[in-house]
Image (cartoon, rainbow, N blue to C red):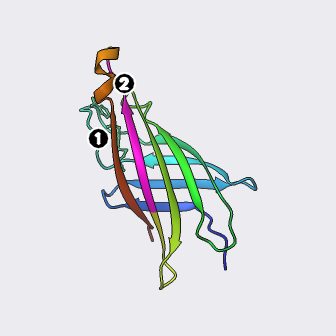
Amino acid sequence: GKLCDLTGWWENDLGSKMHVLKVDSEGNFSGEYHTAVSSTDKPIQPSPLVGSQHLDKDGQCTFGFTVNWKKFSDSTAVFVGQCFSGDNGNEVLQTSWLLREKVDSLPSDWKATRTGHNTFIRTG
Ligand SMILES: O=C(CCCC[C@@H]1SC[C@@H]2NC(=O)N[C@@H]21)Nc1ccc([N+](=O)[O-])cc1
């Protein structure tokens, strides 16, 4: 089957958009994350992402990437997931994420990490 190459534009169930610029021969990639939601009241800005994927021939590769929200919030998200080719050939990315916000002190560390999941499909 075809290689699962994450290059391109993706949209998730929250309406966030991800642009993967280029996947190199090692599976490393970079891009930009345009989140549709945030828990900071600062204006949302596109934020850089870096990640890596497997380049399996069956097209159902696993991957991970990190988003640094440096432009508008002192927090970091990591996503891990797998690409699945639907029956109609459409690719779906099933992901889980951890979102770490910066907290003021160690006693607040317990409440600093959120987790969730997002599904992404390619945008036209
Ligand atoms: O809000 C933020 C930065 C934006 C996070 C967007 C998350 S990433 C996982 C999920 N999937 C998406 O597409 N979008 C959401 N950081 C932040 C978090 C917490 C606090 N806080 O003060 O609690 C402040 C800023």
Pick whichever, 24 or 111, lies toward us: 111
Residue assigned mark 1: 38
User: Which region of the structure is painted magenta?
Assistant: 94-103
Q: Is mark 1 within 8 Å of ligand 1?
A: yes
Specify which label sits upstream in the sequence, 2 or 1: 1
Marks 2 and 1, how far apart at CA: 14 Å
| Amino acid residing under circle 1 | Ser
Residue at 36% of width from left, 54% of height from top?
Answer: 117
Q: Position of residue 46 (x, y in %)?
A: 43, 42
User: For residue 45, which quarter of the picture?
Assistant: top left
User: On screen, 43 above or below 59?
Assistant: above
Q: Where is residue 99 in the image (x, y as percent from the top left)?
A: 38, 38
* Farthest top residue in view: 105
Quadrant location of the N terminus?
A: bottom right
Query: Mark on residue 102?
Result: 2
Quadrant location of the C terminus?
A: bottom left
Residue at 44% of width from left, 67% of height from top?
Answer: 123
* Farthest left residue in view: 41
* Farthest right residue in view: 25
Residue at 29% of width from left, 41% of height from top?
Answer: 38
Pick whichever, 31 or 59, lies toward us: 59
Residue at 40% of width from left, 42% of height from top?
Answer: 98
Of badges 2 and 1, the one in the foreground is 2
Q: Where is residue 93 in the image (x, y as percent from the top left)?
A: 47, 64
| Amino acid residing under circle 2 | Lys
Q: Position of residue 35 (x, y in %)?
A: 36, 47
Q: Does the magenta stretch include residue 86?
A: no
Q: Which corner quadrant of the figure contains ligand 1? A: top left
